[in-house]
Image (cartoon, grey):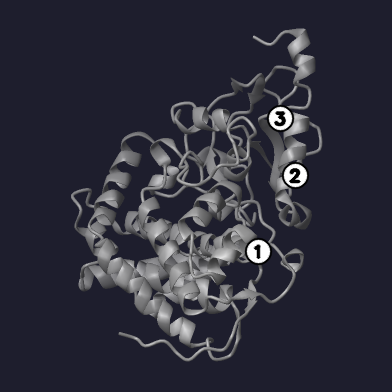
Amino acid sequence: MTTPDSATHTRSYPVAHGSPIDTDDPRIALYSEEFAADPHAAYRDMRSRYGSLVPVELSPGVPATLVIGYYTALRILNDPDHFPADSRTWQKSVPEDCPIRPMLEWRPAAIRSDGLEHTRYREATVAALVEIDLFALHSTVEQIAIPLINSFCEVGTADLISQYAFPLSFAVINAMLGCPPEIGQRAAAGMAALIEGVDAAAGNKMVGDAMFDLVCLKRAEPGDDIVSRLLAHPAQLDDAEMIHQVLSFYGAGIEPTQNLIINTLRLMLTDTRFAGGILGGSLPTRDALDEVLFTDPPLSNYCVTFPRQPILIDGAWLPAQQPVVISMTGCNNDPAINTGVYTDNRSHLAWSAGPHACPARSLASLIVQDAIDQLLDALPEMRLAVPVEDLSWRPGPFQRALVALPVNFSKSPPLQIL
């Protein structure tokens, strides 16, 4: 129970006064360019002002609570009864043209389901993933990476996002899904619009149409791929359910993978602990990847839940049916747990936790590590083409993503494709 003294102490929290009434105080805009430019400073300021729960806006007029306390996040992520992922009640109050609505609206998929439905969807997803041959996946990444590297290695300059990380992530997820490039291209363009909240409604439709075409193709011509295995699973997913399961793979497999590759490369190219290793031929990619998953994970704020009723947590009332967003970056950098030691440390929340934890974390790590190693093995003298402070970050409430990562390197002959 909140006492008068504790109510005064929590006046800055998302819901003041110890009652389930939303705050009228200004909220921090997670979609602003200022936040994107220096989120770590913003998280430090949030922590000093609000503690573990922060009043934010995900988009103009869309309030939410951002969780930046590590142990508070674990409590929420492991309590789907009080913090369900189902957003159907919330979205009734959100305009259809709201740019972030497509990222949070209900779908018949694991990410927005709870209980038996969540179990059904997740079991089908895990069964489709577990059949992936990791050795074959390693070869797939190599076969995709080498032609991409060859497309710019003789030039001496490249933008590693548009010329490497994006097309590689796009091609790898298409290979895993058994998706033809034309369908995959439409899905990728739609997912980018969804994540950035720019023309999101059109992006949502683009993705849905592409997924429907892919599901129809795989019903007619099944193969050794994720979509075909989902169709064959005993869960007997219908077309609408299939579309949204596959959409989840695109959502997780392109933008976040691209951003994890790029954020890790940025660290390796700018931090002397890693840059020295590159020039010396020793590539501590796993160490850099572990550190980025703590400090700059590709999805910085997500794992969204919608409490069914007002709930008291950490001395603050959270309103019913208002988004509660886990800040993976904020929680990972919580002084309560961040020791500055990242090597072989898997306690971060970059893959989430609890029943909705990412089931493809080992696959994602393999893809990212192989993609980076292929690039730096081929071009070990790679360096940034601009000062690191001149790199620009894309605004948006969910992702941690650079606009571009321009590099220079010694011109090299094309690699042989085996």
Residue receiving disc 3: 14
Which label sits in the foreground, 3 or 2?
A: 2
Which label sits in the foreground, 3 or 1?
A: 1
Q: Report x, y in % for residue 343.
A: 49, 47
Label 1 crowding class (10 Å Cα cut-off): few <14, some 14-19, many 20+? some
The label shown at residue 42 is 2
The label shown at residue 270 is 1
Q: Nearer the viewer, residue 76 or 157?
A: 157
Upstream in the sequence, badge 3 or badge 1? 3
Q: Residue at x 52, y 49 (%)?
A: 105
Left or right position of 256 against 404: left
Q: Nearer the viewer, residue 202 or 48?
A: 48
3D distance between C-alphas at marks 3 and 1? 37 Å
Task: Name which residue type carries label 2.
Answer: Ala
Q: Report x, y in % for residue 412.
A: 52, 88
Task: Name which residue type carries label 3.
Answer: Pro
Q: Nearer the viewer, residue 290 or 188?
A: 290
